[in-house]
Image: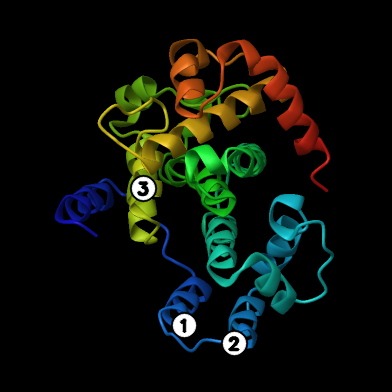
Amino acid sequence: MTINAEKAMQELVAKGIKIPPQPKVLVELRQLLAKDDYDTRELARIISQDPGISAMLFKAARSPVFGRGKKFDAIEQVIMVVGAKQTFNLVQAMSLASTVTVKTRKAFDIFWTRSQEIAQLAAIIAQDRISVCNVFPDQAYMAGIFHECGVPVLMQRFPDYCKALQLEDTCCWPSLADEDARFHVDHCSVGYIVARHWALPDFVCAAIQYHHQMPRDELGAACTLVAIIQLASHFYHRVNNVDDALWQTIGSEVLKELGLDIDGEQEYFDEISERFHARQ
């Protein structure tokens, strides 16, 4: 964690905002993967300690994006097909739901469903554009789950957060300006600190911080990942027949970053949404 991130985290703590700790499973997996001689059985044993994460991992691995259409009976099989590091990225994504809990159950359920669906769309887009973008599906999935993780953290801290920002509706999502005006903090900044605290890759952290814009100062994978998240979010809106006001501002930049033509957006949406609905 950089000095700036440490200072920002201290400021959040001073405001009573609690950054969720990494689950034990993640800590143990990271330590084992740091060794050159880890084996699949040991990785599987660690993951299996958490039944909730294991169940969600099986569900994600059934997707053609990760599991190549295979059916899995054991965690070891998932690791062998998906890959150890890719499985670790998926476990990081799954761990968020088991770590952050809020009293406002309806809003949290909406948040988690939305995050999962955007993550799935992001993984499909990354898989399709891999030769152009060089962002892998597991990285896009992880970013899709985490990109708005600051939202449930702020739900925990401010009892009126959901009511004030009308978050108990699928079509509503927090405005950064409204958050800053009411709570003097925004979910992008909080999400960035969570991502740094959880040791996510730097380009993923940057994408989480800037996911409401196309960052002109961020180059390479970070900018590309923002574009993937934004296109996945836009397609999520379209799948759910909800207006996407932000798309009018950044849509052309997003498509350009991903090597897509604006005139072909409808055809590409049809292709991705078909794969999305057939993912299981």
Q: Quadrant of the N terminus?
A: bottom left
Rounded to the nearest whole Å, what is the CA distance between mark 3 and mark 1? 23 Å
The residue that mark 1 highlights is 32
- Measured as percent of width and height from the top left, residue 172 is found at 57, 22
The residue that mark 3 highlights is 203
* Tag 2 near tag 1, CB within 8 Å: yes
The answer, for residue 168, to whether it is visible in the render is: yes
Q: Nearer the viewer, residue 217 or 179?
A: 217
Label 1: which secondary element: helix
- Measured as percent of width and height from the top left, residue 245 is found at 52, 12
Query: Which amino acid type corresponds to the residue marked 3 in the rendered image?
Result: Phe
Residue occupying the point 47% across, 26% down: 174
- Measured as percent of width and height from the top left, residue 163 is found at 53, 27
Residue occupying the point 64% across, 23% down: 237
- Quadrant for residue 114, please give it: top right
Q: How is the image coloured?
A: rainbow
